[in-house]
């Protein structure tokens, strides 16, 4: 187990390092000069160019700049947006809460509704089960941005139950909850369907196992068998799939934020990508990729804790 | 990120069989029909469209269905049906490009690492593990930031992000074939590695490759449409289903949802069709084993 933890930890650090390098190097490749954007394409006198290059460290070699950027990031300093004339960490700090709130809210919906629907479909047969299959099949195919449009149309424009646009972190908690309900459902719906299907399949599979059949034939109460034998074993794939799919929401949240005008990290990333504001794109991409990698590693560790055979199997390799 | 991802791929591929719903084969015919219609529109849509998809008539803004314009008009008075038909081109060829690129890279990496094994396999697997860290959508946004908005950069980025998923599934299948007796027999006979891979190993993994490509098409379509939706993919005024969902949003808020909904419906129908067909093909490939 210790070896497994160590291996995963090292792998995570290597992946974090590699992804930060890819993000920085990609931005370095970008055509166009940040100073040109700053000057509004007016020609600058050479001494002004030299002064600005020195001020923003544009004249240093690539690896030195990368290292300075990385150590800065580790100290919470994501650089300076030349276009917005602000520190990127301030900009990220203002918006990260909204995105985290949105993703966690969607994750909660997925866990409660997805696993709930899947268990119901797995334990019941007939019409209920068919209903669960149909609902999950249809909603698994609805992309987040189409779901956003449908939810906006039905619940914001026609029924007027929820507001049309998102919110910022300054408002009160119930207000935020109210504003982010539609975005969270739009984000959750397809993933919820996947989790429901996986839950249903693995509950079905566990029910067919011999020890479950034996327990039922011995007259042990059904709800007890379900709780102790079926759900416990079924939980392993369910939690893994839920964790990994919820991690993938981190990227998709950008699309939903754009659809609902939520002032989160993702909508800001899209805006910066459009303007070519590289410092902001770098900073937000790095935060999102790091969140994704760390969540993935945590899910992997959880998986090993739930099913010790995973860590044991690793030793054989 | 290895064990859990492998487990997910495993569980997701074991989706509940559609045969349990009566008339499962009807769904397959439906899928094939949808894909056929979308393909015909992708190739001939611009010529089949009854009106010019980019003809702006501001006096027809948000006008509903009229004779000759069965779906009505969008926010700038362009014929919706014509835009949907013409929009099939980028909406279908974008994902096709992603599938071709990702499958080519995935097949080559999978077969090469299954065949060579050892340090080659280990280093390729490690490289793919790092790629797993980039969600496809995020890589496409990065590409748009660096190379400018457009379908080409987004497709290439998405193909790169999809490759590890394809390569991992195919690698384990290729590994299984590699350990079969017929491969050993070919090696003993002195058949070259190239010939053994292309003439013998590849055809035996073939059904799985086709199934993977079909499923990937659906995912690629969703992600590319999302990129176009947020304005970093296909650029307006060019018609595209993802662009149309996004451009129709002001209309949705004013109570004229036709543009967003019709384009969204096209995307959902095609994605469902590819998913249903892909699952059936995957089941077949599994049964063949």
Image (cartoon, coloured by chain):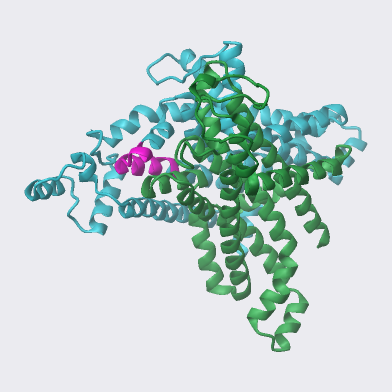
Q: Is residue A278 magenta?
A: yes
Majority secondary structure in the magenta region: helix
Q: Classify residue A289 by image quadrant.
A: top left
Instruction: Identify the chain drawn in cyan.
Output: A
Compared across the picture, whether B125 is left or right of A213 comes to: left
Image coordinates of residue B267 in percent, x first then y, are 63, 37
Residue B208 drawn at (x, y percent): 72, 59
Q: Position of residue A64 (x, y in %)?
A: 23, 56
In the figure, is residue B123 to the left or right of A66? Answer: right
Left or right: residue B178 compared with residue B159: right
Give above or below for B144 relative to A104.
below
Q: Colour of chain B?
A: green
Q: Looking at the picture, tell me which residue is in the foreground, B74 or A170.
A: B74
B79 or B231, nearer to the observer? B79
- Tell me where the magenta segment starts and ends, as one range: A272-289
Where is the C terminus of chain A found, in terms of image quarters?
A: bottom right
Magenta-drawn stretch contains A244: no
């Amino acid at each position: 187990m210790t070896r497994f933890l160590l291996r995963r930890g090292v792998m995570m650090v290597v992946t974090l390092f590699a992804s930060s390098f890819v993000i920085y190097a990609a931005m370095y490749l970008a055509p166009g000069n940040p100073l040109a954007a700053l000057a509004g394409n007016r020609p600058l006198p050479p001494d002004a160019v030299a002064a600005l290059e020195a001020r923003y460290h544009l004249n240093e070699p690539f690896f030195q700049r990368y290292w300075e950027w990385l150590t800065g990031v580790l100290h919470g300093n994501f650089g300076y947006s030349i276009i917005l004339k602000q520190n990127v960490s301030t900009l990220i700090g203002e918006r990260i809460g909204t995105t985290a709130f949105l993703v966690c809210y969607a994750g909660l919906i997925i866990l409660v509704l997805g696993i709930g629907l899947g268990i119901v479909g797995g334990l019941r047969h007939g019409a209920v089960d068919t209903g669960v299959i149909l609902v999950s099949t249809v909603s698994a195919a609805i992309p987040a941005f189409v779901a956003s449009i449908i939810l906006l149309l039905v619940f914001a424009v026609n029924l007027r139950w929820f507001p049309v646009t998102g919110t910022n972190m300054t408002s009160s908690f119930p207000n935020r909850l109210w504003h982010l309900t539609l975005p969270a459902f739009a984000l959750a719906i397809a993933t919820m369907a996947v989790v429901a299907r996986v839950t249903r399949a693995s509950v079905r599979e566990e029910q067919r196992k011999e020890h479950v059949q034996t327990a039922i034939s011995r007259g042990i109460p059904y709800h007890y068998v379900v709780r102790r034998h079926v759900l416990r074993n079924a939980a392993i794939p369910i939690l893994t799939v839920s964790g990994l799919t919820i991690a993938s929401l981190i990227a998709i949240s950008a699309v939903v934020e754009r659809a609902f005008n939520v002032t989160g990290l993702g909508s800001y990333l899209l805006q910066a990508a459009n303007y070519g504001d590289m410092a902001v794109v770098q900073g937000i991409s790095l935060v999102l990729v790091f969140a994704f990698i760390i969540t993935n590693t945590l899910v992997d560790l959880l998986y090993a804790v739930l099913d010790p055979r995973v860590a044991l199997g690793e030793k054989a390799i | 990120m290895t064990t859990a991802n492998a487990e997910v791929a495993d569980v997701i591929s074991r989706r509940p069989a559609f045969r349990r719903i009566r008339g499962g084969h009807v769904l397959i015919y439906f899928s094939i029909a949808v894909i056929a219609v979308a393909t015909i529109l992708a190739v001939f849509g611009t010529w089949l469209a009854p009106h010019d998809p980019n003809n702006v008539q501001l006096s027809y803004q948000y006008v509903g269905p009229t004779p000759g314009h069965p779906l009505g008009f969008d926010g700038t008075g362009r014929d919706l049906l014509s835009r949907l038909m013409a929009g099939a081109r980028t909406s279908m060829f974008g994902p096709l490009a992603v599938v071709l690129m990702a499958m080519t890279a995935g097949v080559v990496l999978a077969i090469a690492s299954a065949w060579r094994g050892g340090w080659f396999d280990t280093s390729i697997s490690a490289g793919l593990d790092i790629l797993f860290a980039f969600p496809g959508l995020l890589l496409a946004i990065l590409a748009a930031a660096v190379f400018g908005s457009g379908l080409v950069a987004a497709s290439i980025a998405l193909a790169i992000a999809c490759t590890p998923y394809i390569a991992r599934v195919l690698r384990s299948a290729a590994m299984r074939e590699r350990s079969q007796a017929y491969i050993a027999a070919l090696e003993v006979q002195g058949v070259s590695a190239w010939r053994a891979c292309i003439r013998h190993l590849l055809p035996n993994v073939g059904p799985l490759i086709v199934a993977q490509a079909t499923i990937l098409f659906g995912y690629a379509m969703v992600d590319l449409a999302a990129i176009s939706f947020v304005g970093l993919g296909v650029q307006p005024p060019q018609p595209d289903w993802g662009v149309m969902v996004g451009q129709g949003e002001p209309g949705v808020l004013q109570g004229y949802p036709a543009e967003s909904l019709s384009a969204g419906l096209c995307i959902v129908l095609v994605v469902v069709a590819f998913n249903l067909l892909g699952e059936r093909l995957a089941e077949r490939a599994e049964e063949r084993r």
